[in-house]
Image (cartoon, rainbow, N blue to C red):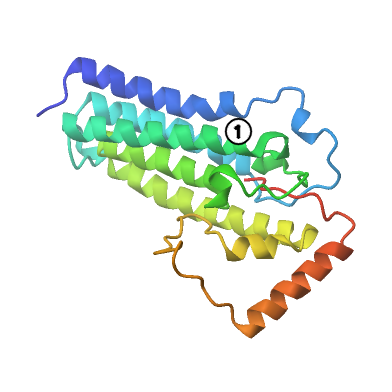
Amino acid sequence: MSVHSPDVWLGVAVLIGAALAPSFIFWHPTYAYASGKHGKLHSVAHFRRVDRWARVFTVVVGSLALARVDPPLLEWHHSVWWLYTGMVVTLAGVALLIAAKRALGWNYSPGFDAYVPFRIVDDGVYRYLRHPMYVARLIIAAGACIMTGSVWLAVAWLVAFDWYWRAAAVEESELAHWFPIYRLYAKRTSGFLPRVHRHRAFVRPRAAPGDVQSDATDLRSLVDSPRATSTSDAA
């Protein structure tokens, strides 16, 4: 089934809405996210600029791919079924972004201006993922690619994945430096894909002696740390 004009306009509206959503979700005109926090985290250079250009690129290329069939756009489909499937994926990414921001609360700070948070957030979506905000952005980008069928957006997704992967590595190194307990949190969670534990309620995993000793060392260092009650994810 081909895409008709109402479907195109709805798809363009979803693209624009998903591109603008992060600006509204993370809007802090008074830099309130820095209030009461001491110390800054290093971040990947030009993070904010790359993120904005990626969103603009997605809206422009995606809108053109929805509105017309043009060889330079490298479209692999022009189907209404893929369009609405992509919309669902995109909206799911926006929902995850909102859930992640809500879980962080005042521990949040943007990736381009990251501060040391108050504590390690390990509830909500952070119970399963260490970087749900990056995952949400990748889901939104994947949804845009599915909606439009443009290979250019698939290439943009790969570039974004590499960018977010490097940004996550920098953040994890910084958080582990400030808060030794972060290493324990990292052992039981996944960065980008949630782990699947089979029969968790019936099987108690055995810890190796070396792991127990390592965990005990981490806990002792946590007790000795002057900031043992503060940490977070600046993703």
Q: In this view, does 72 lie above or below 127?
A: above
Residue shown at 41% from the left, 42% from the top: 139
Residue positioned 39% across, 31% down in the render: 91
Q: Quadrant of residue 209?
A: bottom right
The extreme left residue here reads: 1
Between residue 191 and residue 114, name the one nearer to us. 191
Residue 202 in the image: state x and y as whole percent: 44, 66
- Residue 56 placed where, x, y %? 46, 31
- Give the residue pinned by disc 1: 102
Mark 1 Cα shell of 10 Å, populated few (<14), some (14-19), many (≥20) = some
Residue lying farthest bottom? 209
136 or 1, which lies in front?
136
Is residue 222 or residue 201 the one in the foreground?
201
Q: In this view, does 206 lie to the left or right of 178?
A: left
Q: Is residue 59 above or below residue 6?
A: below
- Placement of 225 over or under 155, stated as above or below: below
Q: Which residue lies furthest to the top in this view?
A: 6
Q: What residue type is labelled 1?
A: Arg
Count of residue discs: 1
220, above or below 54, in the image:
below
The picture quadrant where one finds residue 176 is: bottom right
Q: Which quadrant, please, contains the N terminus? A: top left
Residue 57's x, y, as percent?
43, 34
